[in-house]
Image (spheres, helix red, strand yellow):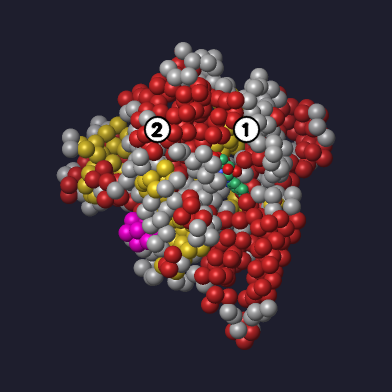
Amino acid sequence: MKIYLPLDSVAVALGADDIAAAITAHASKTGAQIELIRNGSRGMVWLEPLVEVETPAGRMGFGPFTPADIPALFGDLAQHPKALGLVEALPWMAGQTRLTFARCGVIDPLNFNDFNANGGFAGLTRALDMASADIVAEVTASGLRGRGGAGFPTGIKWKTVADAKAAQKYIVCNADEGDSATFADRMLMEGDPLTLIEGMVIAGLATGATKGFVYIRSEYPIAIEVMERAVLLARANGVLGASVMGRGPAFDMEIRVGAGAYVCGEETSLLNSLEGKRGVVRAKPPLPALQGFMGQPTVVNNVISLASIPVIMAKGAAHYAAIGLGRSRGTIPLQIAGNVKYGGLFEVGFGLTLGQIVDDIAGGTATGRPVKAVQVGGPLGAYFPRALFDTPFGYEEFAGKEGLIGHAGLTVFDDSADMLAQARFAMEFCAIESCGKCTPCRIGAVRGVETVDRIAKGDAAAIPLLTDLCATMKSGSLCALGGFTPYPVLSALNHFPADFARSKEAAE
Amino acid sequence: MLDTATLATRTDEILAAHLAREGALLPILHDIQAEFGYIPQECLPQIARALNISRAEVHGVVSFYHDFREVPAGRHVVKLCRAEACQAMGADELSAHARAKLGVDWHETTPNGAVTLEPVFCLGLCACGPAAIVDGKLIARLDTAKLDAILGDLA
Ligand SMILES: Cc1cc2nc3c(=O)[nH]c(=O)nc-3n(C[C@H](O)[C@H](O)[C@H](O)COP(=O)(O)O)c2cc1C
Ligand code: SF4
Ligand code: FES
């Protein structure tokens, strides 16, 4: 019997390793023949740990699984108390367009043959037969925009690096994923690491870079381990090395680990960190594409941007570009988090409204109370009230509502949330994580916390001060940490004014 | 306590393992901290010499990153997620409970040296919060009962 149990951080944090040990022990005691595969997660977090058993009809799911549920796995599966039916037929799975995450949760992430047999390396194989400029043109035609937050067209970035003349160029994968409510990078690296490697190799072919780095945050111990092992696997199988797949140019890569600094997700800060320096943001220009790692032309791309390249190359740019809304082409892995009934990762074409995501897909709150606010795009993203739930999920559409989609994380709050406290936290977070280079960010964020505290004490005169401070931070900050912290602060203030109208008596 | 000879020898070994890498300082510091539990001041001149940078530069890097410790932690390190998605599931109340129970604030160690309490801003477990990482082990769907059981085992 083939049993699947994720090695994904979510499953492990909910006891998967203990369950794996107990399944193995149970099988050896009863003499049952099993093969236990540690796969990635399907992204249905409320069902984790999710055990799957291969049957002639397809893979059947059981979850959320506990050790007590083990013996029944060896009986009539349909009668199992945690039986969910066929996993692929569950509405959450059937409603998605899984392109980037097609193999995540399906294959054994560290089995080279499994990857190959499920469409892996189809994109790289095609790219190896193409001229560099044609690969760049294909990526440009797909409409893919950076999934790290800024939404810059990936093909144009690659062209800049491809056209730059230098003895050494680099591909740097940004796996710092510091935004709260985001975990797509982590899930992909844990569940299908070879796809990321494949994407980075294609980026190397397209731009003439021969060396890659994946900069992974230290808060992701499992992703680090899986990626390290996947690099060894790719090297042993000739994907990485002196000649890509034995017929391409050289490409090799290293995994590097961050050290707990949110700002190191900003690309120039990340490059400084990779070089062994303080993670201080660099002024642009020069662009990293021209003077990046060690002063050399460097592609810096998010995990999901790079991991989407193989499927774009395999299915063609037109297939990818046909999905989406407006200037937001292709699919986006929504990460639905916080106080939700059904949380997890849902990959779908751009264009669902916020209301469809929160009410239909996420099923409202876990507490069963009304939704009060949804923060979209991480700690630098705006808080959206229900009145804006008709906003379609797209870069321009969210920008038009004084918000951003960022890395596509959504945090749902119920009506017990205090939006003044959320505004205070946004300022506090900026103060803690500021790289210190500009005064409006470094000092402004500290003043911001104090100003929100004055408002909390009933000092209404401090409200315009907060608005002014936000304007200064917006215009006077070098990067989006200081520059975008006003988004959560002002959206909280503007959409939820009642939470800022504290009477002096109530505060005392 | 660490004796200086062992410290110097192990530091040399770690340096040798990484010196050929581009931008070797972070990998070196991670290994030093994994080895000694913190970044001992005594290592800095040795690292600086090997990388041909100033001691002040090494110190600047150590102090910039939240992960690097300049003094040893308690026997156990409990990091509770303070970020927004966990807040939406009660992380603030949970950490207030933890601080009261341990009698320490963020970044402090209990007087008996058993537990250091630290904040962490997201572990990628945002759809099953509140989340924590205890001595490197990820934990999700925390509540006060589950946390009390964990802290009870550590004390
Ligand atoms: C404070 C700050 C934090 C950021 N964090 C990340 C991150 O964790 N991951 C990421 O891919 N991009 C992050 N970015 C965006 C990067 O600077 C950069 O735009 C991105 O890595 C480019 O890759 P892409 O074009 O594939 O999105 C951050 C930006 C800022 C200002
Ligand atoms: S805005 Fe803040 S984080 Fe960004 S460069 Fe300025 S000080 Fe550094
Ligand atoms: S917000 Fe706590 S794990 Fe992401």
- In what element is the residue under mark 2? helix
Element assignment for label 1: loop
Which chain does the residue under circle 2 lie in?
A
The residue tagged 2 is A317
Q: Which quadrant of the figure has residue B36?
A: top right
Q: Is residue B84 left or right of residue A275?
A: left
From this view, report whether residue A421 is shown above or below residue B121: below
- Quadrant of the image for the N terminus of chain A? top left
Q: Which residue is identified by label 1?
A: A289
> Is disc 2 on the same chain as disc 1?
yes
Q: Are marks 1 and 2 in contact (CB under 8 Å)?
A: no
Label 2 CB less than 8 angstroms from ligand 1 = no
At 34% across and 27% down in the image, what residue appears?
A119
Looking at the image, is mark 1 or mark 2 nearer the viewer? Answer: 2
Q: Label 2 amino acid?
A: Ala
Magenta segment, which residues?
A354-362
Q: Give the residue type that dot 1 points to.
A: Ala
- Rendered location of residue A247, percent (x, y): 46, 13
Q: Tell me where residue A464 appears, x and y as whole percent.
A: 66, 73
Magenta segment includes A154: no
Q: Going 49% across and 28% down the picture, which residue do you hit?
A: A136
Hey, which quadrant is residue B19 in on the image?
top right
Would you say residue A361 sits in the magenta stretch?
yes
Q: Residue at x 70, y 30 (%)?
A: A295
Identify the residue shown where x is 72% and y is 37%: A277
Residue A36 seen in this snapshot: yes
Q: Main secondary structure of the magenta part?
A: helix
